[in-house]
Image: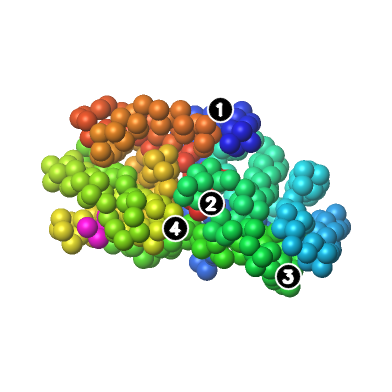
């Protein structure tokens, strides 16, 4: 947690502009390319863009320093597969980026960016409008590119640390590795992953590491970041059509947000608390205060549950409380209250909803008081910014808030909900 806090305090030093100034850099109409792996692009978007843009890819492949780094890392990883035996850390260390390597890449990207239309085009047409690195938006373009790279490198190292080496995640009870790393068979899994990550046609300096991290998430069954994606054409298709036709000026609030409450046993689909929160939201909806209800929560409780909170709440709203699907916005990735609020702001921006209009959150009294109390401080500690601004408290259960566009910023050390 200390490293996490230090990183975001450092990040925060670059983030002095107002929310509204930064919002002009992110484009609500920006569309992520079809066919991308959502687990990959949500966590490591700069690296994904480098892979997808043929001109950028060629530039990096042909750079002597970056090409040399690729060869060094590939050779080191190959040696690790042969010589590390059952030493898991020995294997994973060959794939992680050390500080010297991160600095080398930063230096080369800075040099390559000068007067380079290819990198400049990727930054201005893709990276900046995506909003994925919005916290660096006040920096010079070359500095923003470097910060994005350094964040992606830290994100890869974090994923490997937790889901290969069994380092503690931020929330060990729900997000830990799926394996007993002391079992004899585990080192064979890691070695097989290493061999597969090398046995590719990849030739960019980061690709073996990226592949190693993605396979680690996959074999841990930790691909939660990709659940229900692409949501615009699946679980949220009906509400998106409705959003485009909605006159938000006719309502006091843009939406009603319902944070989930996961059950603590593996057989319960939707907890009693989750049902009651849905009923609180429906009571407000029937007053006509907002045109939409957003249900928020991922596959969180208990450890590695098969049930998704948002999906189960949506199902309950439709089947039991008779709410039309076109009214329900599903946010199925949040793993705690900070990201309930952050992810709500993200979807509101991505779906073209007004960001300068109040929204309403309804939940149990204890969580509602937490949102209006300690949550903003915790958000700054964990995310590096406040994902929302408080409005008025209406009751023990209901609270107004404004969404913050800075919520688009990728979180480097939450690979299941970055």
Sequence-wise, the earlier of marks 3 and 2 is 2
Seen in the picture, residue 211 relative to 163 is either above or below; the reply is: below
Rendered location of residue 380, percent (x, y): 50, 31
Sequence-wise, the earlier of marks 4 and 2 is 2
Magenta stretch secondary structure, dominant: helix
Q: Which residue is mark 3?
A: 195
Q: Secondary structure at mark 3?
A: helix
Rendered location of residue 372, percent (x, y): 34, 28
**How many neighbours does mark 2 have within 10 angstroms: few (below 14), some (14-19), or many (20 or more)?**
some
Rendered location of residue 126, percent (x, y): 58, 53
- Segment colored magenta: 312-316
Q: Which residue is mark 4?
A: 304
Q: Mark 3 to mark 1: distance in Å?
A: 44 Å
Q: Which residue is mark 2?
A: 176
Decide if residue 17 is on the left or right side of residue 194.
left
Q: Which quarter of the rendering shows the N terminus?
A: top right
Q: Secondary structure at mark 2?
A: loop
As drawn, the label of residue 16 is 1
Q: Mark 4 to mark 3: distance in Å?
A: 27 Å
**Measuring 25% from the left and 27% from the top, which residue is drawn there?**
393
Q: Secondary structure at mark 1?
A: loop
Sequence-wise, the earlier of marks 4 and 3 is 3
**How many neighbours does mark 4 have within 10 angstroms: few (below 14), some (14-19), or many (20 or more)?**
some
Q: Nearer the viewer, residue 265 or 337?
A: 265
Q: Nearer the viewer, residue 57 or 366?
A: 366
**Measuring 19% from the left and 43% from the top, which residue is drawn there?**
280
């Amino acid at each position: 947690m200390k490293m996490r806090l230090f990183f975001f305090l450092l990040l925060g030093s670059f983030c002095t502009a107002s929310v509204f100034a930064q919002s002009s850099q992110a484009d609500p109409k920006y569309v992520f390319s079809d066919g991308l792996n959502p687990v990959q692009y949500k966590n490591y978007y700069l690296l994904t863009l480098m892979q997808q843009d043929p001109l950028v890819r060629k530039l990096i492949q042909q750079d002597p320093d970056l090409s040399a780094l690729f060869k060094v890392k590939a050779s080191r990883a190959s040696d690790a597969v042969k010589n590390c035996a059952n030493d898991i850390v020995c294997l994973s260390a060959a794939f992680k980026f050390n500080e010297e390597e991160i600095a080398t890449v930063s230096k080369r990207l800075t040099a390559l960016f000068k007067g380079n239309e290819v990198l400049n085009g990727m930054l201005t047409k893709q990276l900046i409008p995506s909003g994925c690195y919005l916290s660096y938006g006040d920096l010079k373009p070359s500095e923003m590119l470097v910060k994005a790279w350094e964040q992606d490198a830290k994100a890869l190292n974090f994923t490997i640390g937790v889901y290969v080496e069994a380092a503690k995640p931020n929330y060990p009870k729900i997000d830990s590795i799926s394996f007993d790393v002391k079992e004899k068979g585990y080192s064979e899994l890691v070695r097989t992953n290493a061999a597969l990550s090398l046995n590719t046609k990849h030739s960019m300096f980061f690709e073996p590491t990226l592949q190693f991290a993605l396979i680690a998430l996959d074999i841990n069954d930790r691909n939660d970041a990709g659940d229900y994606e692409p949501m615009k054409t699946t679980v949220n298709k009906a509400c998106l059509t409705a959003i485009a036709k909605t006159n938000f000026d006719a309502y006091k609030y843009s939406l009603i947000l319902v944070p989930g409450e996961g059950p603590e046993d593996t057989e319960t689909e939707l907890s009693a608390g989750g049902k009651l929160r849905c009923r609180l939201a429906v009571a407000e909806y029937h007053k006509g205060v907002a045109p939409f209800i957003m249900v928020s929560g991922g596959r969180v409780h208990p450890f590695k549950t098969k049930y998704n909170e948002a999906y189960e709440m949506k199902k309950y709203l439709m089947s039991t409380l008779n709410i039309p699907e076109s009214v329900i916005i599903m946010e199925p990735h949040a793993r705690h209250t900070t990201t309930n609020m952050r992810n709500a702001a993200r979807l509101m921006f991505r779906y073209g909803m007004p960001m300068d209009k109040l929204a309403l959150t309804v939940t149990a009294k204890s969580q509602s008081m937490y949102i209006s109390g300690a949550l903003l401080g915790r958000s700054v500690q964990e995310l590096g910014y406040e994902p929302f601004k408080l409005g008025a408290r209406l009751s023990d259960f209901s609270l107004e808030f404004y969404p913050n566009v800075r919520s688009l910023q990728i979180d480097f050390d939450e690979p299941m909900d970055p």
